Amino acid sequence: MMNEEIPNLTAFDEAALDKAFGVVEQQAREAAAALSGGEAVEAFRLQWLGRKQGRLTEISARWLKVAPPEAKKALGQKFNALKAVVEGLLDEAAGAGPNDAALAAEAIDITLPGTRRLTGAEHPITRTLNEITSVFAALGYSVGVGPEVETDYYNFECMNFPPDHPARDTQDTLVVANQDRRPQRDRLLLRTHTSPVQMRTMETQPPPVRIVIPGKVHRNDAADATHSPIFHQVEGLCVDTNITFSDLKGTLDHAMKALFGSAVKTRFYPSFFPFTEPSADVQISCIFCGGKGCGKCKQSGWIELLGCGMVDPAVFAFAAEKQPAYDPKKISGFAFGMGVERIAMMKYGISEIGSFYAGDMRFLGQFA
């Protein structure tokens, strides 16, 4: 039994203590020398250092209990020395022997490259938004943001949409329920374009203003290959003194070349938008056939991409109600807007707009 292997102390002089502790230390060294394998090492640890039945615990209880007060200090010092020897034997046994192979298998070679965790990639819509925004940022434009739930005033009225304009109809606009008791201008809806941010910016910032406005918009459109009730726009606004249509043309021509390559050409032809006058649609030479004519451009050599125009004086008049510096007699400006999905579909050869929103990892993985 364990207790029989621990000699009893009948004397507590230095010689007696040295002899008693020497016997126990020799037992520990012999036991440690015979160890083989991780299980034996753990058994040695429990046998000698176990808190309840370990030999050192038993020695402490038996020898210190009967020791006279004058011997307790020397006995305690020798006990601590014995404990240090046992712990050293245990460390040596745990670090060598047959369990080396198991430890080596768990070792880490710090010279090898680490395991890279997949971090994902930008969604093609996000990537295209950032590309467009960066083009205009390089021209000195800042980025404007605003709420997706807007009032009729900011979405339509201050953008010079008349009260009976078809875009206000619920067939085109997604409106918030239970708004009938509110005045028309205060009724809430999901913004149909990012134009409200233009007015919100002008109300808080005097000219000059140069902003681009990327964001999500909503329209009550049936989903098909090229339409979605949720899509993204990037609009722009430039206001200063002596801004002309030629400034607008030069800006957009530069932007299209930055997005699609220096060989791309642009052309403008008349159109109509309530918030700009004069207004124009912008076409670019077909990036697929170089303007020669193909199925993508319906053999015309041109692809319609965005709308633009000079800011209507009526829009400046609304801004002047809160920011008098927007006097249409003293300042001028231009605005433009483009659909991000359309540009992304052209850049990446995507035929179905719904692919952007389906969450199919096979599709999204192409952009990683």
Image (tube, rainbow, N blue to C red):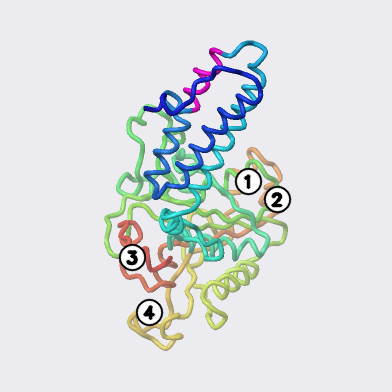
Q: Position of residue 223 (x, y in %)?
A: 27, 57
Query: Are there few (<14), some (14-19), or many (20+) residues within 10 Å of tag 2?
Result: some
**Which badge, 3 or 1, is on the more N-terminal residue?**
1
Q: Circle 3 is placed at which residue position?
A: 363
Q: Circle 1 is placed at which residue position?
A: 202
Q: CA distance from mark 2 to mark 3?
A: 44 Å
Q: CA distance from mark 4 to mark 2?
A: 39 Å
**Which badge, 1 or 2, is on the more N-terminal residue?**
1
Quarter placement of the C terminus? bottom left
Q: Is residue 70 left or right of residue 271?
A: right
Q: Main secondary structure of the magenta part?
A: helix
In the figure, 244 relative to 231: above or below?
below
Q: Foreground residue, 73 or 17?
A: 17
Q: Secondary structure at mark 3?
A: helix
Q: Circle 2 is placed at which residue position?
A: 207
Q: Circle 4 is placed at which residue position?
A: 297
Residue at 38% in and 49% down: 218
Segment colored magenta: 56-66
Residue 263 position by quadrant: bottom right
**Which badge, 4 or 2, is on the more N-terminal residue?**
2
Which of the two discs, 3 and 1, sits closer to the camera? 3
Query: Are there few (<14), some (14-19), or many (20+) residues within 10 Å of tag 4?
Result: some
